[in-house]
Image: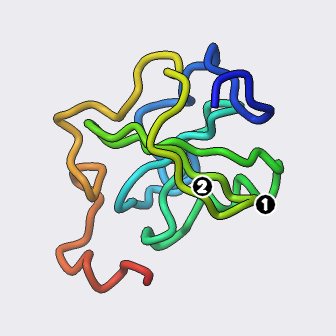
């Protein structure tokens, strides 16, 4: 997967949380990072599904998990999972101390009811 259209290993992530959820005061279950522009968005199990929305808006096909200890990529165009690929610019995950779901202080007590299937 190195030298693949849609992946730019030199671009750092946009932050340590979902850009749109942070702006709106929302929360997320897990985070995904656009492998082309670095946008960090929430996963499809999260209430707002911002990573998929980013793909639909931009056409950037690949995301990588932005969870500690995970390095897999997902291709939105083909619905394929890749267990390996190029190392993206650091940091490669949100901070270890940031909880999932997160961020701390914004996750409702009944958060599991807000997850999407």
**Crowding at label 1, few (<14), some or many (≥20) Cα neighbours within 10 Å?**
few
Secondary structure of the residue carrying tag 2 is helix
Q: Earlier in the sequence, mark 2 or mark 1?
A: 2
- Nearest the eye: 110 or 7: 7
Q: Position of residue 42 (x, y in %)?
A: 49, 56
Quadrant containing the N terminus is top right
Q: Position of residue 16 (x, y in %)?
A: 41, 34
How many labels, in total? Answer: 2
User: Does residue 107 appear left or right of residue 51 in this picture?
Assistant: left
Q: Residue at x 38, y 60 (%)?
A: 27
Q: Residue at x 60, y 58 (%)?
A: 80
Q: Is residue 113 above or below residue 27?
A: below
Q: Is residue 27 above or below residue 92?
A: below
Question: Which color mode does the image show?
Answer: rainbow
Residue indicated by mark 1: 56
Q: Is residue 37 above or below residue 54?
A: above
- Nearest the eye: 102 or 92: 92
Residue indicated by mark 2: 51
Q: Is residue 102 above or below residue 49?
A: above
Secondary structure of the residue carrying tag 1 is helix
User: Does residue 6 appear left or right of residue 38 in this picture?
Assistant: right
Residue 14, quarter of picture = top right
Label 2, label 1: how many angstroms apart (C-alpha)? 9 Å
- Nearest the eye: 105 or 38: 38
Q: Are marks 2 and 1 in contact (CB under 8 Å)?
A: no
Quadrant containing the C terminus is bottom left
User: Does residue 93 appear left or right of residue 82 in this picture?
Assistant: left
**Crowding at label 2, few (<14), some or many (≥20) Cα neighbours within 10 Å?**
many
Q: Position of residue 49 (x, y in %)?
A: 56, 66
């Amino acid at each position: 997967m190195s030298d693949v259209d849609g992946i730019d290993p030199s671009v750092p992530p946009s932050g340590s949380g979902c850009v749109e959820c942070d702006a709106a005061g929302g929360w997320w279950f897990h985070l995904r990072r656009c492998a082309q522009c670095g946008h960090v968005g929430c996963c499809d199990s999260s209430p707002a599904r911002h990573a998929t929305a980013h793909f639909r808006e931009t056409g950037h096909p690949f995301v990588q998990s932005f969870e500690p200890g995970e390095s897999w990529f997902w291709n939105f165009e083909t619905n394929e999972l890749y267990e390996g690929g190029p190392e993206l610019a650091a940091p490669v995950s949100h901070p270890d101390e940031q909880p999932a779901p997160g961020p701390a202080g914004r996750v409702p007590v009944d958060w599991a009811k807000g997850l999407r299937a």
